[in-house]
Image (tube, coloured by chain):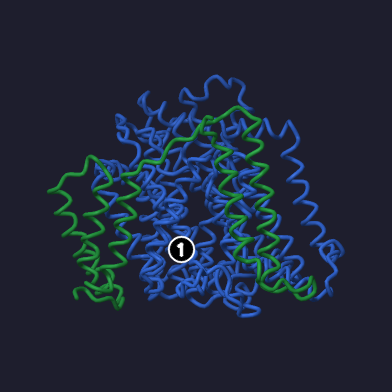
Chain colours: A blue, B green
Amino acid sequence: MVLADSLALGLAAAATPINLVYCLTGALLGTLIGVLPGIGPVATIAMLLPVTFKLEPLSALIMLSGIYYGAQYGGSTTAILMKLPGEASSVVTALDGYEMARRGRAGPALAVAALGSFFAGCVATLLIAVFAVPLGDLALRFGPAEYFSLMALGLVAAVVLARGSVLKALAMVVLGLLLGLVGTDVNTGFVRYTFGIAELSDGIGFVVVAMGMFGIAEILLNLEQRQIREQATATVGRLWPTRGDLRAAWKPTLRGTLLGSVLGILPGGGAILASFAAYTLEKRLAKDPGRFGKGAIEGVAAPESANNAGAQTSFIPLLTLGIPSNPVMALMVGAMTIHGIAPGPQVMTEQPTLFWGLIASMWLGNLMLVVLNLPLVGVWVKLLSVPYRLLYPAILLFCCVGVYSLNYNAVDVVLTAVFGLFGVVLIKLGCEPAPLVLAFVLGPMMEENLRRAMTLSRGDATVFLTSPISAGLLVATALMLLLIVAPQFRRMRRDAFAE
Amino acid sequence: MTRRQDVAAGAIFVAFGIAALGVGWNYPTGSATRMGPGYFPMLLAAVLIGFGIAVALAGLRNRAIPFERMALRPAAAIMGAALAFSVLLPLAGLVPASAAVVAIGSLGYRESRPVEVLLSALLLSAFNAALFVWGLGLTINLFW
């Protein structure tokens, strides 16, 4: 059993006392920012990147990934108790979760959410382990043409599967690609779009864009709402679900896990899409859809297991192909680069301890979360009573110092604020920032692979269609684009995000 | 003329496209076999202008969705805080720069209270110094 050996190797690497501490730290931090609205995993991971400089690479990655899946657990707690989804991926949980809480069933809702998440986490960890090797082998056969087509598929999928106008999202992708090209061209040393600012010759930092568009923009939007809304907190009461609850919840948990795992692997997918899709699916399948929105336990079990599964399987494209599928994974690329690791299929063979250690840590982290989360619910709720007027200056300050410390560059701090303002403008115009941020990371990689592919083929553009893998990926891309035109899919897409 | 969301968005995309085209006009494009540094950007800029026009046209045709104006106070406060940080840090060190971020940033919210701001500026800049300089060993001056 090669798989079992690999997992054992990973478990041994992840279960050292120091790594367990970082795993716990990451999971707890993730839960904390999951609970707090107004700060998400992207901004947090970006802030903590400099903190990981001094850690061992494995410890750093363990902690950072813990933040992402920890946030999925934390987001559900406040969604259920206060109808305040701490994360976008818990928005649908608030619908039925809060209704359950109002009917005195907050305990079972929390328990089902936590147990569902744990189950999904276990399944997703196993899926990563199983799929990593074959996908990695496939990736080793990839040349520049294949990589280019894969990135095209990823960007288009990110657009089609996101909410909002597809046309605007495509424009955001192109804008992101362009912004990614600022700085010195690696092939020729030619300096592009720096406007004579020396600090820009290495390009705009990814953390600058991500922290601005997610961290700073979020603060600005929160400050615009004069009144941060106060909701009555439901009391938790009896924690354990009844036998009937479990009977009603196990199938949605299973379906949510499967759906979430698949959507997580897709480029552009991840936790948010998974939770929306799972909720819609359960509503479709229910004998009595009218119960949804009125405290149906399926409406908590399915999206909560789906978002956790999606959060974890979105590591698959990163770990096997070296391509990030969402902004959080793009930050993980940044974290790996800081430690001198080039993400891609070679990580698995060259650094098996790192690779399998990270995977095993996800399972350990999920275990910690399910054990710790329920007893800690009271603490998390208390934290929410910290008023935003005290919280946001602290977040702002950490953003400033975090950005500065990456390159000791004061211009980056101002640039981050500029991207924050730009992000708010775009969000107000109905343009989601995620496609732009993803394209920003992929921009230089796409250009590089396009050039190499064209040079290898002596300027013959048909190379993208004569290689079977590349052609397959481009066909998938075209199908994705065609889907948008299909009226049935349009309706489904609208319904899925309508809640 | 109502403030149409999509028309404004389209205009922004077109503006970025034209700027990219204009600034990069003289970048060597090379040939398809040996692409120069100008090839991919010019391609993207043209596509961006196309998408921008399409977005704006769709916005004119569809039901008008007006956009909200941006609140100036938070934007000015956050921008001011970032500027203050980047100016003060090399001149005065981490502690004054941190305090300035908290103080100026707090101006962006009507509910901020002066005494609290003062206290959190003190506490947070001390905490920052402890975490980043002593804890993580970043080489930043604490004071001038």
Determine which quarter of the picture holds residue A144.
bottom right
> Hey, what amino acid is under mark 1?
Val
Most foreground residue, A497 or B67: B67
Q: Residues within 10 Å of mark 1 (few under 14, many from 20)?
A: many
Q: Is residue A137 above or below residue A45?
A: below
Find numbered disc 1 in the image and state the secondary structure of the residue it sits on: helix
Residue A329 placement (x, y as % from top left)? 54, 59
Most foreground residue, B47 or A253: B47
Q: Which residue is mark 1?
A: A207
Q: Is residue A271 above or below residue A302?
A: below
Determine which quarter of the picture holds residue B83.
bottom left
Residue B108 placement (x, y as % from top left)? 28, 46
* Furthest residue in direction left, as rendered: B115
Task: Identify the chain of the residue marked 1, using the numbered disc in the image.
Answer: A
Question: Is residue B110 something one can see in this rendering?
Answer: yes
* Residue in view at x 36 percent, y 56 percent: A29
Determine which quarter of the picture holds residue A279.
top right
Picture mark count: 1
Most foreground residue, A497 or A397: A397
In-image side of A396 versus A255 (left or right): left
Q: Is residue B35 above or below residue B84?
A: below
- Can you say which quadrant of the picture contains the N terminus of chain A? bottom right
Residue A191 placement (x, y as % from top left)? 57, 75
Question: Is residue A306 something one can see in this rendering?
Answer: no
Residue A26 placement (x, y as % from top left)? 39, 60
* Residue in view at x 62 percent, y 62 percent: B22
Most foreground residue, A348 or A34: A34
